[in-house]
Image (spheres, grey):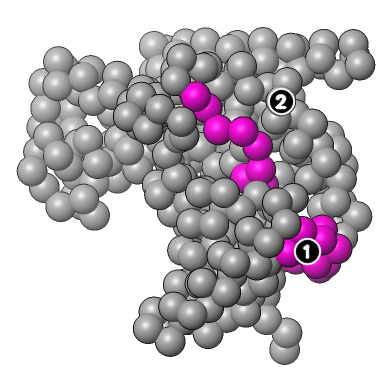
């Protein structure tokens, strides 16, 4: 039986680190594609040299030839320019839309049966680019956002309470930006909601830091953005799909009436398995939570409108 195959388009910090994390799971062979000649080949060899020590024996290939993603089970799009200090994710739209469109065209050509995970920013809007360009079913295009935002929230909660990171489970909905919607009611420590363990001021402080988590790292780096946690989030999603693990996690999904939102990619809880998004879970949100989610959706929709204008003017 042939091994499963994961291709990663874009071998910068996020893409290359994701390839490493996926390799360590020993679940699939990996192809990294980037337009920079030689970079992916070098990184692939470096990963392979570490294999005997890290105990992964999968194939890892680096290339600038998109045809090598042929018949991939999962394709991850990380290609695009990173966010810089003072730059909103929406500022990236015009630059990254063309990059993601080109990647999606190659995915449709060489891996028409794959599931696509979009990582490029502005993420929710780039999901629309990939979805429209590939023509894939809505279940097979998904954005990596909520898992990353939730793991940041989990860390801040664990830090505040002084508890084990693995005991914390969090839920963050909405767009991957300043209007994301962390949900304290659905964030727990060993099953206990944090609303029973922390006062409102502490929770509000962590919610705010979660929303600004990416920008905080950008401010330190000056010329780059986060990549360890985003790459780990990608690897979790890849594993759920490749192994059909049925993982329930917040992801950017295309909604068709769920949460009273139509025709928009936005972060909601979803069951990930071999068919991509196998089910969207609708939480019983309180009025304030629903209003925040709709505000976040409106911000994403504005970005989609900008995207439509951008392409219509060309």
Residue at which label 1 appears? 69
Residue 83 to residue 164: above or below: above
- Residue 273 visible in rendering: no
Determine whether the residue tagged by mark 1 lies in a helix, strand or loop: helix
> Where, quadrant-wise, is the C terminus in this rendering?
top right
Mark sitting on residue 95: 2
Q: Is residue 259 left or right of residue 217?
A: right
Q: Position of residue 138 (x, y in %)?
A: 75, 42
Q: Is residue 68 magenta?
A: yes
Instruction: Work out whether residue 165 or residue 288 is closer to the camera in this orientation and state it.
Output: 165
Residue in front for this viewpoint, 172 or 67: 67
User: Which percent across, then down, holds residue 184?
Assistant: 28, 28
Tell me the crowding category of disc 1: few under 14, some 14 to 19, or many 20 or more residues within 10 angstroms, Cα based.
many
Q: Using the numbered discs, state the Cα–Cα distance from disc 1 to disc 2 in whole angstroms.
A: 24 Å
- Please tell me whether mark 2 sits on a helix, a strand or a loop: helix
Q: Which residue: 83% across, 41% down?
A: 102
In the displayed structure, 240 sits above or below 118; it is below
Quarter of the rendering occupied by the N terminus: bottom right
Query: Could you say which is closer to the camera, residue 231 or residue 42?
Result: 42
Nearer to us of marks 1 and 2 is 2
Residue at (8, 43) in percent of width and height = 162
Q: Position of residue 14 (x, y in %)?
A: 52, 48
| Percent x, y of residue 25 | 47, 72
Is residue 276 magenta-colored?
no
Q: Is residue 166 visible?
A: yes
57 in relation to 224, above or below: below
Residue stretch in magenta = 63-84
Which residue occupies 90% across, 11% down?
A: 313
């Amino acid at each position: 039986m042939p091994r499963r195959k994961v291709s990663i388009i874009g071998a910068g910090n996020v893409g290359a680190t994701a390839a490493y994390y996926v390799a360590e799971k020993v679940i699939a062979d990996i192809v990294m594609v980037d337009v920079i000649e030689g970079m992916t080949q070098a990184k692939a060899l470096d990963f392979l040299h570490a294999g005997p020590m890290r105990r992964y024996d999968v194939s890892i290939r680096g290339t600038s030839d998109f045809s090598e993603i042929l018949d991939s089970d999962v394709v991850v799009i990380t290609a695009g320019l990173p966010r810089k200090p003072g730059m909103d994710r929406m500022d990236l739209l015009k630059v990254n839309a063309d990059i993601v469109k080109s990647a999606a065209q190659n995915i449709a050509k060489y891996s028409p049966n794959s599931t696509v995970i979009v990582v490029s920013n502005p993420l929710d809007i780039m999901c629309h680019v990939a979805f429209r360009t590939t023509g894939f079913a809505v279940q097979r295009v998904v954005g990596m956002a909520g898992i990353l935002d939730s793991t940041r929230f989990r860390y801040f909660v664990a830090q505040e309470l002084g508890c084990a990171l693995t005991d914390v489970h969090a839920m963050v909905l909405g767009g991957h930006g300043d209007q994301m919607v962390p949900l304290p009611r659905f964030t727990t420590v060993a099953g206990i909601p944090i609303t029973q363990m922390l006062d409102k001021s502490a929770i509000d402080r962590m919610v705010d830091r979660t929303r600004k988590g990416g920008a905080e790292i950008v401010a330190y780096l000056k010329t780059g953005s986060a990549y360890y946690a985003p790459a780990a989030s990608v690897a979790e999603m890849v594993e759920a799909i490749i192994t059909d693990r049925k993982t329930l996690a917040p992801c950017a999904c295309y909604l068709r009436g769920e949460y009273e939102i139509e025709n928009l990619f936005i972060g909601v809880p979803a069951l990930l398995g071999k068919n991509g998004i196998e089910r969207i879970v609708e939480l019983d949100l309180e009025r304030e939570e629903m209003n925040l989610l709709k505000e976040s959706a409106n911000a994403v929709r504005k970005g989609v409108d900008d995207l439509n204008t951008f392409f219509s003017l060309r």
